[in-house]
Image (spheres, coloured by chain):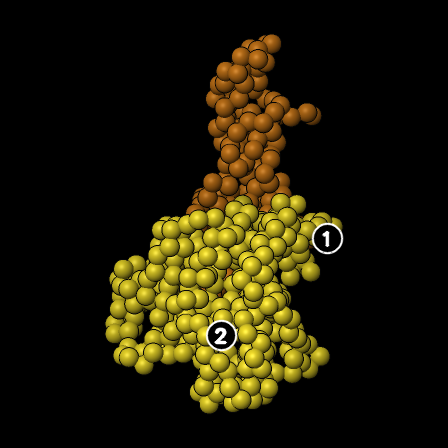
């Protein structure tokens, strides 16, 4: 028996199951003309493909609470378009395909822990932390002392991501990157 | 991105209204009282707690120790009118279970006033003057429900088939929504945004007879309720009636509402017997209106969130 949510429980951030898919509520509004019926209007984002749609419910209706949970899982390896993760507590493994991993693949490093979203115990998405520390595997040699010009150069990270870094950064150094913007933040201290 | 930050529970003791919100509330209450004092309308108080309720298919009262908290001071104030009080007003808390949102709080402040001997058209004039006394001068326009639906939703609310009403909505409606529900959604989705764009004060009048609540009905086809809603910037602020004075008709409507509630699996509500007795004894011809005070304060402050004008909304009461 699934958990049901009444219209008062339809709030921003709550995850619901509609049309056999998991969604997260990105906006919820209670609307009611003075002498008329009450409705809850929600804007929802599909947790699998990112589509955003609107739905309206009567106050008497209930909505299925999505059987979704976030779990910290270790990224094991990437092979032929599939990313393999493991629950470090149970050693259970989950696999995500290219579409499900999406842009997160730029930040996935083997052996590190990431937040994997499971729907009905199946992995559907992975989220890197807001900031990650990664090693530069390729960039032009650093220009010593240039810490003020603001000029940048491209650098390739161990995960394959490309970021713009200041000129004084060298190959083999570790840097801190904001995964939400894909931008260099600072040189990481060892 | 998927993790919406939750408020720190240690911080929930704080008021959601800032000093400006609290000051706007105090100033608005004073202006309302000054307005009615200058017009010799008597301020009254009636019980918040009563063994009777007002059955309505879409208003849920809050139960309290076997009694009900008032959803509106309407029935008690009509008892005063029937006793010969003359013009009266009240600023009271009202309670409606489950009504929480950007513009709703389950506990809110309502101004209700009655003008014995007046027509609803006269009360429309006074309603506009009242808002202008608080918010400043503004242009006024009026739309009948039918004209507004034709102009802003492209439908005839009285004769178009339900499929046409569904097509006029910006998104699919909930399943098994009846005709009146579709019109409710068209009102909030198509008409109210147009009123917001229009600016100023906008009267919406002559609602479908099924949405008469406690208003007189003009039987001329299509039957319409002698009722107005006054909108400011797309927000519904005042609801006014040519009050129904026929006790028999009133009792019938309340019992119908209980039957409708039964079809929605909602409990039947006990009708205030004193109210029906007062109508039998004789309610003078009167117009009456209710204003959402919190929303008026929102407009005075220039915010579209009710939490900005409440010290403590219900979720941190």
Residue A164 image offset from top left, x and y in percent: 50, 24
Task: Locate the C terminus of chain B by quadrant.
Answer: bottom right
Chain B, hue in figure:
yellow
Residue B230 image offset from top left, x and y in percent: 43, 61
Labelled disc at residue B116: 2
Residue B156 image offset from top left, x and y in percent: 26, 69
Q: Which chain is tinted orange?
A: A
Task: Locate the N terminus of chain B by quadrant.
Answer: top right
A109 lies above or below A8: above
B260 lies above or below A6: below
Residues B77 and B158: in front is B77
Category of crowding for the residue at label 2, using alpha-carbon neighbours closer than 10 angstroms: few (below 14), some (14–19), many (at least 20):
many
Identify the residue at image location x=41%, y=70%: B120
Q: Decide which of tag 1 and tag 2 comes sooner along the chain.
A: 1
Labelled disc at residue B13: 1
Identify the residue at image location x=55%, y=47%: B301
Q: Chain of mark 1?
A: B
Residue B57 image offset from top left, x and y in percent: 49, 78
Q: Relative to B219, is B39 on the left or the right?
A: right
């Amino acid at each position: 028996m699934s958990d049901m949510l009444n219209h008062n429980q339809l709030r921003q951030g709550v995850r619901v199951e509609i049309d056999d898919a998991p969604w997260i509520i990105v906006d919820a509004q209670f609307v009611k003309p003075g002498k008329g019926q009450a409705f809850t209007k929600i804007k929802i984002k599909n947790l699998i493909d990112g589509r955003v749609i609107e739905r309206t419910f009567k106050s008497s209706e209930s909505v299925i609470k999505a059987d979704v949970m976030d779990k910290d899982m270790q990224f094991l390896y990437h092979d032929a378009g599939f990313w393999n993760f493991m629950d470090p507590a149970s050693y259970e493994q989950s696999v995500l395909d290219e579409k499900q991993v999406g842009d997160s693949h730029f930040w996935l490093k083997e052996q590190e822990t990431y937040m994997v979203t499971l729907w009905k115990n199946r992995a559907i998405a992975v989220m890197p932390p807001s900031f990650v520390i990664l090693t530069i595997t390729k960039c032009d040699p650093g220009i010593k002392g240039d810490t003020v010009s603001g000029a940048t150069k491209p650098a390739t990270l161990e995960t394959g991501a490309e970021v713009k870094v200041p000129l004084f950064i060298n190959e083999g150094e570790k840097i801190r990157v904001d995964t939400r913007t894909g931008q260099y933040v600072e040189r990481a201290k060892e | 991105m998927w993790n919406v930050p939750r408020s720190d529970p240690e911080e929930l003791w704080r008021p959601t209204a800032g000093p400006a919100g609290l000051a706007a509330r105090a100033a608005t209450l004073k202006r309302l009282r000054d307005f009615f004092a200058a017009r010799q309308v008597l301020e009254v108080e009636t019980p918040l707690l009563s063994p009777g309720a007002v059955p309505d298919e879409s208003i849920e009262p809050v139960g309290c120790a076997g009694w009900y908290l008032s959803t509106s001071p309407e029935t008690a104030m009509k008892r005063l009118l029937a006793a010969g009080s003359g013009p009266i007003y009240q600023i009271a808390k009202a309670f409606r279970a489950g009504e929480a949102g950007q513009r709703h709080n389950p506990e809110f402040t309502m101004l209700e006033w009655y003008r014995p001997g007046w027509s609803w058209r006269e009360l429309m004039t006074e309603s506009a003057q009242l808002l202008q006394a608080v918010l400043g001068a503004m242009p006024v326009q009026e739309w009948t429900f039918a004209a507004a639906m034709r102009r802003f939703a492209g439908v005839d609310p009285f004769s178009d088939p339900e499929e046409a009403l569904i097509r006029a909505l910006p998104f699919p409606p909930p399943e098994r929504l009846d005709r009146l529900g579709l019109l409710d959604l068209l009102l909030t989705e198509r008409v109210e945004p147009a009123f917001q764009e229009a600016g100023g004060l906008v009267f919406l009048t002559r609602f479908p007879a099924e949405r008469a609540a406690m208003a007189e009905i003009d039987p001329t086809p299509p039957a319409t309720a002698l009722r107005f809603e006054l909108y400011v910037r797309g927000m519904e602020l005042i609801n006014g009636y040519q009050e129904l004075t026929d006790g028999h008709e009133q009792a019938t409507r309340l019992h119908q509402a209980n039957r409708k509630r039964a079809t929605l699996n909602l409990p039947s509500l006990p009708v205030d017997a004193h109210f029906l007795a007062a109508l039998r004894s004789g309610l003078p011809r009167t117009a009456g209106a209710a204003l959402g005070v919190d929303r008026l304060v929102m407009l005075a402050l220039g915010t579209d969130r009710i939490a900005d004008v409440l010290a403590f909304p219900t979720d941190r009461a």
